[in-house]
Amino acid sequence: MTLAPDTPRTARSGSGRLLPDLVRVLRAHVVRATRRPAPEPEVPPTPESALLRAMCHDMKSPLASLEALLRSLDRAPAQHDELLGLARAQTAHLSSMLRTADASGGAARRAPGGRLLADVVRASVAASGLPSHQLTVGVQDRAADVSVGDARVQRILTNLLENAHRHGDGAPVLLTITCREDRVRLALTQDVAHPERIVQYLRHDAPPVDLTGLGLWSVQRHARDLGGTVVWATSAAGLTLTVQLPDR
């Protein structure tokens, strides 16, 4: 039996599409195989993750220097005093960075019970490491009796003082606390060489990539969370940073 002569011509004509169909299938397969999933959008860093990243970045070099200095103490007895002085300086630098990180990070937002603002000021001064001979504090009587129920107020004060300690080149610091109407004002004045470098950290919405400016960025973030503002001005006395918080 012979099938070919009796097969309709139209049925055989479909075989002419075999090659184009095969090319189409192969092309679709290649496209699917080479297609890559779209990269996920980068998630903005949280304040907590930025703080951890900044600490890891900034503490690497001081810790390496401190380790090298301590290893050299026994090998270079003639330079013992000089090496010990450098080691103490590195230790103080690390302690300063830790104070900034601690005052910027995740302590409980509510203070237990309530504390008088005068007590919060004393605690902030002690935590900042700022030498007493460098600091003058003036607290208005009415402001001293304001009750503070949020731990972020102490963080703001500690960060302001710690920043003055780390970046003020030893210049005197004046801290004044006043209360007018329904606002408490925390004002720090210091004659710094480049006030614009300090102010820039108060303008950023995102946390800095290292600990440089983290304390000031934290000040404006905490102030905003508390319903307050941070303003600044320059005068003959120097740069004044003023944090205004609602008395509530």
Image (cartoon, grey):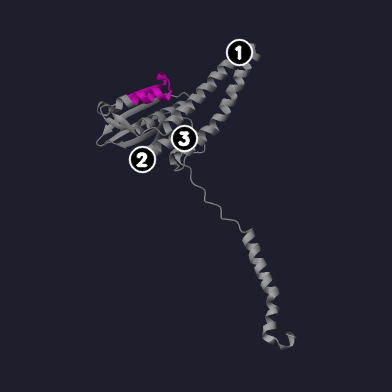
Between disc 3 and disc 1, whose residue precedes?
1
Q: Is residue 133 magenta?
A: yes
Q: Are marks 2 and 3 in contact (CB under 8 Å)?
A: no
Residue behind mark 1? 80
SS category of the residue bearing label 2: helix
Residue behind mark 2? 225
User: Looking at this view, is 23 or 95 the one in front?
Assistant: 23
Q: Is residue 139 left or right of residue 73?
A: left
Residue behind mark 3? 214
Q: Amino acid at mark 2?
A: Asp
Between disc 2 and disc 3, whose residue precedes?
3
- Label 2 and label 3: CA atoms lie apart by 16 Å
How far across and how far down the image is residue 59, in percent?
54, 29
Is the residue 12 above or below the residue 186 in the image? below
SS category of the residue bearing label 3: helix
How far across and how far down the image is residue 88, in percent?
53, 18
Q: Residue at x 66, y 14 (%)?
A: 75
Q: Can residue 53 be seen?
A: yes
